[in-house]
Amino acid sequence: MVQRAAILGAIVLGGVAVTGLMAQGLPGITPIEQVSEDVYRIPGAGGNTVVFVRQNDVVLVDTKVPGNGEGIMEQVRSITDKPVTMVINTHSHPDHVGSNAFFRENDNVQVVAQANSAARMSVASGPFPANPVDTTFTTFRAIGDGADRIELYWFGAGHTDGDAFVYFPDDHVLAAGDIYAWHMSPLIDPASGGSMLALPTTATAAYYNIPGAQRIIAGHGGVHSRAEFLSWITFNRGLVQIAEQTVQTGGTEDDAMDRLYAVPSFAVFMGSQPLPGLEYGGTPRSRARINLRVAMAELRGEEAPLIMNLPPDQQ
């Protein structure tokens, strides 16, 4: 687990080849799953790929690590023969944009991303070439009409500063990307503009400004209810509040963890076992500790670190 996390962390920062990640046993693509009438999820090989079947074509949200274009298409072809015409990226990390090039080169698809993500994708990073974006948006963009309509939202920083929420109104399904992954406190990538302090406000804005979303597809992991999404927001807001109170009173990280444990409704987010589908990223408890550390660093005006995982004695 720790080894996989370290490798993905290096990939996010452009440090190693994707083949190294796959060699370490990152689970490959698993069969496509139907979420609603026209929305599907393809798990594995990085982040979830969301498939939206429109009247005449198919839109994908995120394309996993490089080398998975054919695998994604195999799953798409198991449900429809309609052409893929667009890829929407929820953010710029390689486990979500890695196979964009396959679709650009083979199907000439249009790539859409939030402006901050697009700026990062336009620059080569380590072993990854630039990943061009054709269409950008800042805070909101609507694509298509009627049952084909897609709404793109940006509410601020969280996992990165370019996290896009992709909503399919007719299906009442929201693809949240990695700001909401595995139903636990998420990875914060400060180098990509991520902020633990900003995350609760960003996520709360998504909850209230997209009231029709009844099912939320996490960036990694499964599909969650609106009530589960709200409980996750409440936990992260509580984590930030506890971090702030701890800093103000001169307390320690352990003090803050004890306060999180003391809230009964937070128990689901403080578990010591990896969640189903958790290929990398630690346990809910270790992620909570990591994000207390990140929030406390931000509150002290320090440079917040990117922490993929913790050693066993800190979990």
Image (cartoon, rainbow, N blue to C red):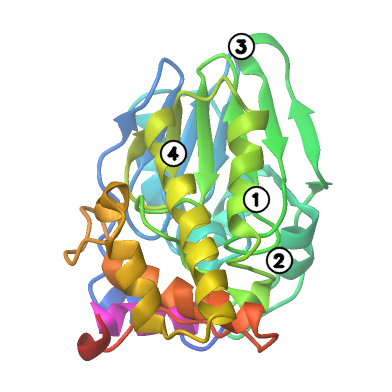
Farthest front residue?
249
Left of 196 or right of it: where is 95?
left
The residue under label 1 is 201
Alpha carbons under labels 4 and 1: distance apart: 14 Å
Alpha carbons under labels 1 and 2: distance apart: 25 Å
Residue type at mark 2?
Met
> Which numbered dot is residue 62?
none
The residue under label 3 is 147
User: Is residue 116 or residue 78 the one in the foreground?
Assistant: 116
Please determine whether, in this image, residue 182 is positioned above or below residue 193: above
User: Is residue 8 or residue 107 the one in the foreground?
Assistant: 8
Q: Mark 1 falls on what kind of element?
A: helix
Residue type at mark 3?
Ala
Farthest top residue?
146
> Which residue is at a point 48% across and 66% down the rendered structure image?
242
Q: Mark 3 falls on what kind of element?
A: helix
The overriding secondary structure of the stretch rendered in magenta is helix
Who comes first in sequence, dot 1 or dot 2? 2
Q: Mark 4 falls on what kind of element?
A: helix
Who comes first in sequence, dot 3 or dot 2? 2
What residue range appears in magenta?
A: 1-13
- Residue 10 lies, in percent from the top left, at 47, 85
Who comes first in sequence, dot 1 or dot 3? 3
Please determine whether, in this image, residue 233 is positioned above or below residue 314: above
Who comes first in sequence, dot 4 or dot 2? 2
Q: Are marks 1 and 2 in contact (CB under 8 Å)?
A: no
The residue under label 4 is 229
